[in-house]
């Protein structure tokens, strides 16, 4: 028997979520962010499902290569930019646009001399996150340098990225927006600021291109809210089956380290999934799963291939019954909160031995 652990990717949910972000930002073009293998959902599968997007944002040139090989002809933007001269002919060959955020990239472009056709670039300014981007006061100078290069297309998209757009009560996003707008005031070119949380919570930032990632997968970046709370549908359901049910006596301990002591004589279900599949080992006793669609808590430590479930409330559960770890009926954000992380990290962390199926 093959391992039961599987990730079902809901193609209709991806499409639904694209519709949601489009309706939220009707005047903007959509750069669907598909980095990290489509946030763990499978790059080609996600890109085909999201063919209605205006472009795709990737973090690695290899991902752009995969999208082109899969026959996708939309615009593609390399969000973290190129990092060596050999990337430049590859960008051209694949017709991929690139973010430019650092002087080292300006130098590589200048050294490339007469290469054609001109590359399309997205000039990234650091409006306050202090990760990637030129200081705002350099916007005019860097823009002029790029425009003077014959190997760079004249149409330069101006962009920035938010550090805290998921905090809807914070002033940091409007402050970053103001810093960006001041920096690019008078410069020609389309503007792009908004990630998922800004698409949902900061309409004034939508501008010409929105760059949603998580929202397309039904993931919430907003503390205390699930994707479903935000009108999104989960694009992944992670599930497996019960491979054993054992009666364990009161006072006996379950799993590595014996961190859970049975308060009763009780049925313990064992499900075929563990941290080797990407289920977080940090999920403590009490984290919910769905057995036959009903909630039950996990108990003891998650092991590599297995985890244990308190079945006291589900006396009819049988070996072979389905167990859902997150997805439809169980928001990934709930598991993430329990494990001390965010849904994004859980989705990206599904490992290669998990079988992916589409519905
Ligand atoms: C990852 C990323 C996004 C998408 O962020 P989400 O929170 O997933 O919507 C947008 N822009 C840039 C530059 C990114 O790196």
Image (tube, rainbow, N blue to C red):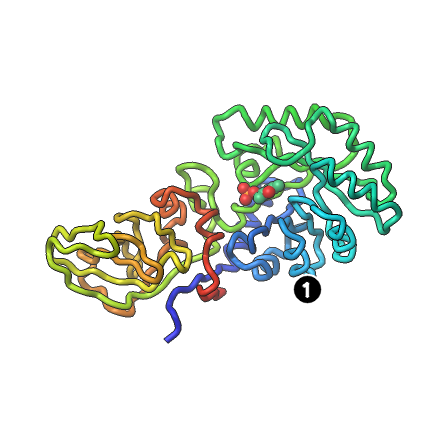
Q: Residue at x 38, y 51 (%)?
A: 280
Percent across and percent down for residue 266 are 14, 58
The image shows residue 215 at horizontal and vertical percentages of 52, 46
Q: Is residue 267 above or below residue 101?
A: below
Image quarter hosting the N terminus: bottom left
Q: Residue at x 74, y 29 (%)?
A: 139
Q: Position of residue 94 (x, y in %)?
A: 74, 57
Side of 296 relative to 324 (left or right) = left
Please give the count of numbered marks on the rendered protein: 1
Q: Position of residue 193 (x, y in %)?
A: 63, 35
The residue shown at (87%, 43%) is 150
Q: Residue furthest bottom?
A: 1
Report whether residue 206 is seen: no
**Which residue corresponds to mark 1?**
69
Q: Please name whichever residue, 151 or 313, is drawn nearer the observer in this view of the structure.
A: 151
Please name whichever residue, 111 or 338, is drawn nearer the observer in this view of the structure: 111
Mark 1, ligand 1, within 8 Å: the answer is: no
Residue found 58% across the figure and 58% down from its top = 43
Tell me if I can see residue 353 in this picture: yes
Secondary structure of the residue carrying numbered label 1: helix
Ligand 1 is in which quadrant of the figure?
top right
Using the image as rendered, state which of residue 47 and residue 246 is in the foreground.
246
Q: Residues within 10 Å of mark 1 (few under 14, many from 20)?
A: few
Q: Nearer the viewer, residue 299 or 327?
A: 299
Q: Is residue 25 above or below residue 1?
A: above
Q: Is residue 234 above or below residue 1?
A: above
């Amino acid at each position: 028997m093959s391992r039961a652990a599987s990730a079902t990717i809901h193609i209709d949910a991806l499409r639904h979520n694209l519709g949601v972000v489009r309706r939220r930002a009707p005047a903007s073009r959509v750069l669907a962010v598909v980095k990290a293998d489509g946030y763990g959902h499978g790059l080609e599968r996600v890109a085909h499902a999201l063919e209605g997007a205006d472009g795709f944002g990737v973090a690695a040139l290899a991902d752009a290569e995969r999208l082109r090989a899969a026959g996708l002809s939309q615009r593609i933007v390399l969000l973290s930019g190129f990092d060596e001269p050999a990337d430049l002919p590859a960008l051209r060959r694949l017709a991929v646009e690139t973010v430019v955020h650092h002087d080292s990239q300006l130098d590589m472009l200048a050294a490339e001399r007469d290469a054609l056709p001109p590359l399309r670039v997205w000039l990234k300014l650091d409006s306050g996150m202090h990760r990637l981007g030129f200081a705002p006061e350099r916007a005019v100078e860097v823009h002029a340098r790029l425009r003077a290069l014959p190997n760079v297309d004249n149409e330069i998209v101006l962009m920035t990225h938010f550090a805290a757009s998921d905090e809807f009560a914070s002033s940091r996003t409007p402050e970053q927006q103001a810093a960006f707008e001041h920096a690019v005031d008078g410069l020609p070119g389309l503007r792009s600021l908004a990630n998922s949380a800004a698409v949902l919570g900061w309409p004034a930032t939508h501008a010409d291109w929105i760059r949603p990632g998580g929202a397309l997968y039904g993931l919430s970046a907003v503390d205390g809210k699930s994707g479903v709370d935000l009108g999104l549908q989960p694009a992944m359901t992670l599930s497996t089956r019960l491979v054993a049910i054992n009666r364990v006596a009161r006072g006996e301990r379950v799993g590595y380290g014996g961190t859970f002591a049975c308060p009763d004589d009780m049925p313990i279900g064992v499900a075929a999934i563990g941290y080797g599949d990407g289920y977080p080992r940090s999920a403590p006793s009490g984290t919910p799963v769905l057995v036959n669609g009903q909630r039950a808590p996990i108990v003891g430590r998650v092991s590599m291939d297995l985890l244990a479930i308190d079945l006291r409330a589900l006396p009819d559960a049988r070996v072979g019954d389905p167990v859902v770890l997150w997805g439809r009926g169980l928001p990934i954000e709930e598991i993430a909160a329990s494990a001390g992380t965010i849904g994004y990290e859980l989705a990206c962390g599904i490992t290669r031995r998990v079988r992916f199926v589409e519905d």
